[in-house]
Image (spheres, coloured by chain):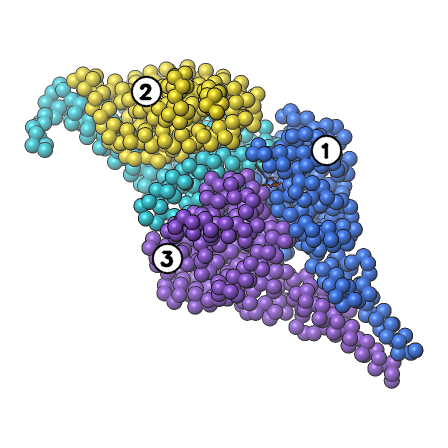
Chain colours: A cyan, B blue, C purple, D yellow
Amino acid sequence: MSHFNLSAEIDRYAYTNALSKNSPVTKLFFALSLLLISVLSPSPVVPITVFLTTTVMILLCAKIPWRFYLRLLWYPTVIVALTCVIIALFFGYLEPLTEVNLLGLRWTIFRDGVATGFTTFFRVAGALSSQFFLVLTTPMTSILLILRKARVPKIIVEMSLLIYRYIFVFIEVMETMHIAQELRLGYSGLLKKLRSLSMLIGNLFIRTLDQGERTFTAMSARGYDGNIRVLEDVPKPNNAALAGIMFFAVALAIVAYLTVNIRIV
Amino acid sequence: MLFRLENLSHQYSDGTIALDNISLSFSKGERIALLGPNGSGKTTLLLHLIGILKPTSGKVYFEDKPLEYTPKALLELRRRVGFVFQDPNDQLFAPTVKQDVAFGPLNLGQPADQVRKAVDEALKLVGMSEYAEKPPHFLSFGQKKRVALAGVLAMKPDAIILDEPTSNLDPRGTSEILHLLLRLNKELGLTLILATHDVDMVPLFANKLYILNKGKLVSEGAPAELFSDTELIRSINLRSPRITHLFEVLKKEDKLPINPRLPLTISEARKEILRLLESETGEKKKRTRT
Amino acid sequence: MLFRLENLSHQYSDGTIALDNISLSFSKGERIALLGPNGSGKTTLLLHLIGILKPTSGKVYFEDKPLEYTPKALLELRRRVGFVFQDPNDQLFAPTVKQDVAFGPLNLGQPADQVRKAVDEALKLVGMSEYAEKPPHFLSFGQKKRVALAGVLAMKPDAIILDEPTSNLDPRGTSEILHLLLRLNKELGLTLILATHDVDMVPLFANKLYILNKGKLVSEGAPAELFSDTELIRSINLRSPRITHLFEVLKKEDKLPINPRLPLTISEARKEILRLLESETGEKKKRTRT
Amino acid sequence: MHIMEGFLPHPWWEIWFAVSIIVVILGIYKLKKLTEKFPEAKPLLAVMGAFVFVLSALKLPSVTGSCSHPTGSGLAAVVLGPAIASVLSAIVLLFQALLLAHGGLTTLGANIFSMGIVGPVVGYVLWVVSKKARLPTSVGVFIAVALADLSTYVTTSLQLALAFPSTSFMDSFITFGSIFAITQIPLAIGEGILAIFLFDFLVKYKGKLLSAMNVIGLRVGLQSQEASK
Ligand SMILES: Nc1ncnc2c1ncn2[C@@H]1O[C@H](COP(=O)(O)OP(=O)(O)OP(=O)(O)O)[C@@H](O)[C@H]1O
Ligand SMILES: Nc1ncnc2c1ncn2[C@@H]1O[C@H](COP(=O)(O)OP(=O)(O)OP(=O)(O)O)[C@@H](O)[C@H]1O
Ligand SMILES: [Mg+2]
Ligand SMILES: [Mg+2]
């Protein structure tokens, strides 16, 4: 269930972090431009810079506890690192780098494979940290409001909002159901564990649909008409900040261009 | 007439007949209580009033016009009539208490500072101001109920429908909210329609009482009138208010000369006891003289 | 001692201190009521007893052994102690009422026909037999509460913890369930621990009363004792039972010679009124004679 | 199976974006039509979406720049048709990227293509075919959902192989594909079985609404159920 706690916590930080009162447009612009530059950049220099920048912003400006940030990073890092090792081992063919003895087999490692592995790893690091910056500092409702202003069809924004709410309904229903089952001795022993779990998954949908409909009813009863409205006036983006970000992005783009040929291996 | 139900029946998709040919009408400015055992159809009836459920047969009239189920007509209806749900967990969904209470007023299209004022006021009325920034799912059950009520009060409707408003509230909360509702009723003419199991509260609150049982309307009238019919009350899983019950016993078992119109509230009971003491001594006096 | 809490404190992750240094103990076979205003920490306390919440500081003892939070120890605890949630929607998860009630007994490893018997019995006790095949989410709120209770009764535990068992129940349901609990307590020695706002019910039910306020234990003792301390009761958002209140008024306002130990229940009130009438006439008689 | 943020190099993520957006726009159009006519269907649609989210959060790590988990989009396609399933998947993938760091923003296009388009189309086609072949409903649902799940993974392997070619595209495809297969085949079977129950429930309790909504997939299902009675 830990993934769900993760989403609930990400959501909580989005509403409570030290940057939550800043303009969501600025934050979105910042995150997306760094993200794009990381992904487009051919060498690892720019993604590394982006990773460091956003990490500093997340920890020092938004004041997200570093423990939590590490927890977020840990899981993707492991997967990507493993995958990049695979890419490095299997996916080169141009220029042999070295040979290793693996499980009694002689294995040729190629320079281009290792290079791709490294580049990919750092690209992911830069991109992912930009994405984390966005979600840790910007409440989902603000993101949806921006989408609405950007003329994304209303039905999409509305469905997104509902799905977003129901995700948390799901999580809550799942947790309370799990506790209720434990209190009546579910999950004791393998067979009971299976029975409890299948009952949980099978009924999760039913319960959530039921709860979801009742919540929708309650929303309708308070005049909900498909439009999202929030109380906090969305802070206006600050032009100086936008220009600063633009400048930084251009500088990074130039760096990216200049470092095209820099290789780690 | 604010609401009128004409031969209303409702059958749920699994075949349960939850309402069976109900006709009644609620006037403006009244304080109406719906009483009935579990599963008698109270919630189902209330959900028809704001167009969340559609009758299987029969009609709902709002201000003498048949209810239309178009989004626009429903929106207008819900702007005028607030609804507080029986289970506050159904009703609260915003990330903070404040935003939840603001949801209704914002949907009414009010400007931000007016909304803010309405929210602060409503939270104060239900005694939850200090929890404004807390996420609703971190509140105790009774606190959630208060917030749910605030969410509706903030919309300043003409009528409020409340499904079990006082269950899970502490006694002070119950009495504060009752007094608040009575005040709104008196000062602003707010119509109140409420479903409840709390028979002790009904005489303090309602001027009109409807009794439901198994989907049927079994009785309507003033609370004093209906509670005198102890047979009826007993027969459908209800009971008289405790105070009334005390006097029933005194009358039946101890053969005391209690007024035929049994007292329902503490203040009525007090008068009755004083009267008893007076007359009793009078009686005895007479007897000793002769 | 069934449960003992030693300097128990609990702070929620957002910083709320819900319980503050509470020490108390519950003996076997007792009928315990926890009373306190909304947000006073009743639910939080109860959740500690069955190991759903862990104390921030302090200790919970079950049968004089400190509670271990290993799956095995918790399992044993929950086999012995049943828990009924405040919100029945938290508790029901199976596709039909019957399957939900059977969940616990099946996990106890009972053979099929024994389970079937236990389920039928439990549903009958709470008056929900005819709904056995219905999906729980199609029930009315009060009906859900009854099913939730049945699910715990069917496990035949040694002790039951109930969080607001009677809120949203109709009066007959309330009285039936109270009598059922009292009977189980008397006949089988079942320990009952219950959180409630229903002060009128407490004197009928509890032999031991604990009063919580803002996370602190403010008082404990026999109900009659505690309710006599009207100052305390008032000061923390509670009130006396209505019957008691009536006599408070008669004593204070009307200066009637009421017993210092105010009546709490209808039968006590009846005796007191009869006594009053007697003595009053006696008094007057004396006076007329002289 | 979602490809992680930043994992796809330029120009592959742009290409998949372009391909997916067309289908999603078609889906949005259909969704708009449907919800205008049946506002009461919104909770059901949204719960479907949330369910897809939760299912794909039940993830098992797999060493391929992504991980294995049920997809949920196959059932959505069987019940609601592939166009609407694609929109729901798109929204869910966005939330997975944002709330779970699962998948990503730039890789959104590629992930929509595999989970929101190929999976649902495969599932839907198989569902219709199995109905035409008069297979029992449960078998039809199982086949449709399990294969929708698998096809999603095959597509992901394909996308990765295109972006990271080894000596040949096939080599790379086989490498990625076989790593996925270990965890994914049992998962697909599990998801298929779960779908049978959920479908049954939906027909039982939401049959009226769904058949009124006139979603083709379900209509086929309902008809055949009636026929079998
Ligand atoms: N969604 C539903 N589907 C099928 N039957 C339902 C549904 N909701 C309620 N019922 C049934 O309809 C009847 C009336 O239910 P309703 O909720 O109106 O009762 P109520 O008077 O509000 O009861 P309570 O006091 O317990 O809240 C009950 O028998 C109940 O089981
Ligand atoms: N999950 C939570 N996170 C943070 N604070 C919480 C949480 N649950 C409860 N609280 C707070 O802890 C305090 C005690 O809550 P608790 O639910 O124990 O009260 P209670 O006595 O059961 O109230 P009620 O009578 O309303 O049910 C309240 O102030 C509440 O806001
Ligand atoms: Mg009800
Ligand atoms: Mg509580």
Question: In terms of image quadrants, where is residue B215?
Answer: top right
How many angstroms separate mark 2 from mark 1 (CA)?
A: 62 Å
Local packing at callout 2 (Cα closer than 10 Å; few below 14, some 14-19, many 20+) is many
Is residue A29 visible in this depiction of the protein?
no
Q: At 40% from the left edge and 48% from the top edge, which residue is drawn?
A: C112
Above or below, B239 against C29 in this view is above
Q: At 76% from the left edge and 41% from the top edge, which residue is drawn?
A: B29
- Between C13 and D221, which is closer to the camera in this rendering? D221
Judge if badges 2 and 1 mark residues of a common chain.
no
Judging by the rendered image, the residue that carries numbered circle 1 is: B7
- Between A160 and D128, which is closer to the camera in this rendering? D128
Is residue B235 visible in this depiction of the protein?
yes
Question: In terms of image quadrants, where is residue A43?
Answer: top left
Q: Tag 3's secondary structure?
A: helix
Is the distance from the Cβ of mark 3 to the nearest ligand 2 atom less than 8 Å?
no
Q: Tag 2's secondary structure?
A: helix
Q: What chain letter is assigned to the residue under label 1?
A: B
Judging by the rendered image, the residue that carries numbered circle 3 is: C76
Q: At 49% from the left edge and 57% from the top edge, which residue is drawn?
A: C161
Q: What chain letter is assigned to the residue under label 3?
A: C
Judging by the rendered image, the residue that carries numbered circle 2 is: D13
Judge if badges 2 and 3 mark residues of a common chain.
no
Mark toward the viewer: 1 or 3: 1
Q: In the shown orientation, is residue D59 left or right of residue C114?
A: left
Horizontal and vertical percent position of residue D167: 16, 18
Q: Tag 1's secondary structure?
A: strand
Local packing at callout 1 (Cα closer than 10 Å; few below 14, some 14-19, many 20+) is some
